Amino acid sequence: MDAEYSALEQGSSSCRTAAWVDSQSKQKRQRCQGSSSDQLGSSTSDSLQMAEPELQDFNYGEAEEEDYYMDDDDGDGDGDESEYEFDEADFNQQLADKFDDLDLPPGVEATVPWLQKIEDSGVSTTSELEFEDDITKKYKAFKQFYTVQNFSDHHYANKVIDTTRREWAKRIQHEWKILEKDLPASIYVCVAEDRMDCLRAAIIGPKGTPYHDGLFFFDVQFTSSYPSSPPSVYYHSGGLRLNPNLYNCGKVCLSLLGTWSGYGCETWNPAQSTMLQVLVSIQALILNEKPYFNEPGYASSANTASGEKNSVQYNKITFLHSCRTMLYSLRRPPEGTSIATMGRMFFFLYSTPSVEK
């Protein structure tokens, strides 16, 4: 009788152990689904106490972790942790989608990382390309050589010369053709219909210089003796001297103009020299990388430690003067340049496609 009772008790204990394992699995699934563990009966608690000595090698933490991954969305119950992959970006996107229709305060939305949706890089790139293409089109729309009716504010407007000579008129027309055909991309020229002797040029400062992207205006007059003598050139300084060769009074010192000493090809040659050569010389020789050494007294200090130090300091001041000169020109745009050439200045200052031609 005692042997039969003992066998029954052992069988009951095994059944209870199996029931305990099964109840534990149910409890873990119920906790993941938000159910209360109080639904389990008191018999389960009793079986836990009776089966505990027989499960000393059972690792509860490992079983719980394994059961957690076993309860996947597909319901396949394979329990293989290594096959589980968590995509954080996709998870955050799904969370953010659920809040699309909610009007959250900007401060709250800015502090929640998963509410910051990722933009499509392809759309951004396309937009940038379209923006750059629009700028390029507007840049090309600016004419480099164009004609206006008159120059009432031209520096030489009140200085009337004899323009009736046929040879003189043919030479001026020849100069116009050269300028229209061969002007570099960084120089703009405007001429007047009723004053063939007057010309206005806008020169953009070369890259790598303290004049970089600056716009500098010059008024030119072809004298009655042209081309036997060089043209007269006036610089719109705005009262600032930003180069040893450009005075605040408007004087331009250049060998080609006869306002500075020079030899050979540096001086004016009636048979070969042109207005285009004058403008390119101003841009290349005057608006250069180290204008400090344009001053004759400082030229000998080039490539010395003290000379280079002074040159760097001079460039800093020159850059500030260059910016102030541009502001002056924006407030008082020379006539004939307020549309095309001033638009070019705005293009460089703001790089925006809203600039009108």
Image (spheres, rainbow, N blue to C red):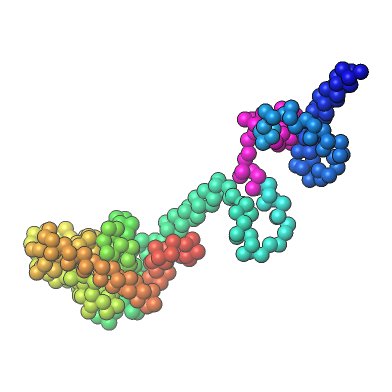
- The residue at 60%/54% (across/down) is 113
- The residue at 28%/72% (across/down) is 321
Looking at the image, residue 226 lies above or below residue 331:
above
- Tell me if 60 is positioned left or right of 298 in this view: right
Q: How many marks?
A: 0
Looking at the image, residue 331 lies above or below residue 53:
below
Residues 107 and 125: in front is 107
| Residue 199 shows in this picture | no
Residues 125 and 189: in front is 125
- Please check the rendered image and state whether residue 158 is part of the magenta-colored stretch, yes or no: no
Q: Position of residue 298 (x, y in %)?
A: 11, 67
- The residue at 86%/36% (across/down) is 43
User: What is the magenta range?
Assistant: 64-92
Quadrant of residue 243 in the image? bottom left
Looking at the image, residue 137 lies above or below residue 343:
above
Residues 317 and 347: in front is 317
- Please check the rendered image and state whether residue 90 is part of the magenta-colored stretch, yes or no: yes
Quadrant of residue 304 in the image? bottom left
Q: Position of residue 299 (x, y in %)?
A: 11, 64
Q: Residue furthest bottom?
A: 158
Q: Position of residue 171 (x, y in %)?
A: 23, 63
Quadrant of residue 10 in the image? top right
Q: Residue furthest front?
A: 2
Could you tell me which quadrant the N terminus lies in? top right
- The residue at 33%/67% (across/down) is 215
Q: Position of residue 151 (x, y in %)?
A: 34, 76
| Residue 31 shows in this picture | yes
Residues 258 and 211: in front is 211
